[in-house]
Image (cartoon, rainbow, N blue to C red):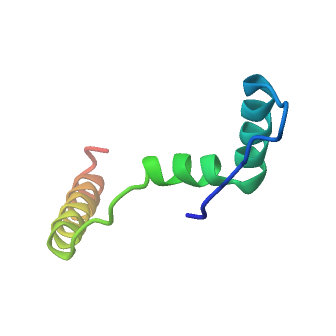
Amino acid sequence: MENLEVRKKEGESIASLLYRFSKKVQHSGVLKEAKKRRFSVRGVNRNKRRVLALKRENKKKETERQRKMGLL
């Protein structure tokens, strides 16, 4: 992340300073990046992928067996 710095100008109100800062933050894309990272999904580990693949394969075989028997 980049550092954002806004210095108060002489005679500038706090509201004006806050407005400039918020505009700079929006323009930089910092909030968009933070929101994207907030809900990032972790990858599934290798063992869990293997178990899920075996379950899918077994379900596929069971469906095919039932189709051949006329149950589906």
Question: Which residue is depicted at the point 75% across and 41% down?
Answer: 8
Of 61 and 21, nearer the camera is: 21
Question: In the rendered view, does 1 fall on the left or right side of 16?
Answer: left
Question: Which residue is depicted at the point 22% across and 70% down?
Answer: 45
Question: Which residue is depicted at the point 61% across and 46% down?
Answer: 31
The location of residue 48, given as percent across then percent down, is: 17, 66
Question: Which residue is depicted at the point 83% across and 38% down?
Answer: 10
Of 35 and 15, nearer the camera is: 15
Query: Is residue 37 placed above or below 1 in the rendered structure?
Result: above
The location of residue 27, given as percent across then percent down, is: 78, 50
The location of residue 30, given as percent across then percent down, is: 63, 53
Query: Is residue 44 placed above or below 8 in the rendered structure?
Result: below
Of 16 and 60, nearer the camera is: 16
Q: Pick the quarter of the image with the C terminus.
A: top left
Query: Is residue 50 placed above or below 63 in the rendered structure?
Result: below
Quadrant in the rendering for residue 55: bottom left
Query: Is residue 36 placed above or below 18 in the rendered structure?
Result: below
Q: Pick the quarter of the image with the N terminus.
A: bottom right
